[in-house]
Image (tube, rainbow, N blue to C red):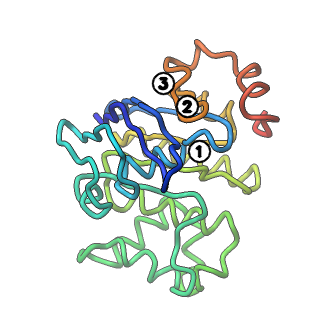
Amino acid sequence: MLALGDITAGYGETTVLREVSLWVPPASVVALLGANGAGKTTLLRVASGLCRPRSGTVRMDGADVTGHRPHVTARRGMCHIPEGRGVFPHLSVRENLAIHAAGGDADETVDRAVSAFPVLGSKLGQQAGALSGGQQQMLALSRAYLTDPCYVLLDEVSMGLAPVVVDEIFEFLTGLRRQGCALLLVEQYVTRALAVADYVYLLSRGRVEFAGEPGELDAEQLTARYLGTDHGN
């Protein structure tokens, strides 16, 4: 289990999160929802080690990893897909994928990525920065498939993408869950997130306002109150 306990964190003198506790059980999908500025991205950064909390603990399967650097949490099975399509734009698609081989068979790594996202197969020699937004996101997401993580943190992976690409990405996320990965999902498409989630946390001004199962929430009221128009309907 990924467990964040009483996390208080921020940047400089600004406090973003206030005593936030959240649990991600193995092989589950947890949706983390809230308005812009609620602290969702900061919470993912704390979980992966990109942001050290001022107080509170982060535990992975019982081990205290609070404040550990991202490469340490990654070795323990954490994969963080940040907002903004984290690829190396000046490297080719093949080179981006080979980085995740981690000393293994680069060709096998490429084959696995192409099996997950076939469109990448015809783009292997292209610079990653020349791909469409959806293709760049597929390339970024392939890391969650190639590194065999236990926990995957996903920050707005569907943002700005065409509906058909969003469908493909959610199909991929469902496949990850079937393989036993646990997902902590920050997502703008509220109804899509609720449809795949086992548990939901709602952040408001840096605090947890709701924690429970999706069926306990009214999606329309949630959208109107916290998130504005839900383009995923």
**Along the line of sight, which residue is nearer the eye, 179 or 196?**
196
In this picture, residue 205 sits left or right of residue 69? right
Q: Please, what secondary structure does the residue beneath circle 2 have?
A: helix
Instruction: Specify the quadrant of the image occupied by residue 202.
Output: top right
Tell me which amino acid carries mark 1: Phe
Residue 190 in the image: state x and y as whole percent: 67, 33
Image point (38%, 39%), residue name: 182
Residue at the spot of label 3? 199
Q: Is residue 144 above or below residue 167?
A: below
Residue 196 numbered tag: 2
In this picture, residue 107 sits left or right of residue 117? left
C-alpha span from label 3 to label 2: 9 Å
Residue at the spot of label 1? 170
Of all residues, the one furthest to the top in this rendering is 216
C-alpha span from label 1 to label 2: 9 Å
Tell me which amino acid carries mark 2: Val
Image point (59%, 44%), residue name: 170
Pair 1/3: label in front: 3
Q: Are marks 1 and 2 in contact (CB under 8 Å)?
A: yes
In this picture, residue 139 sits left or right of residue 27? right
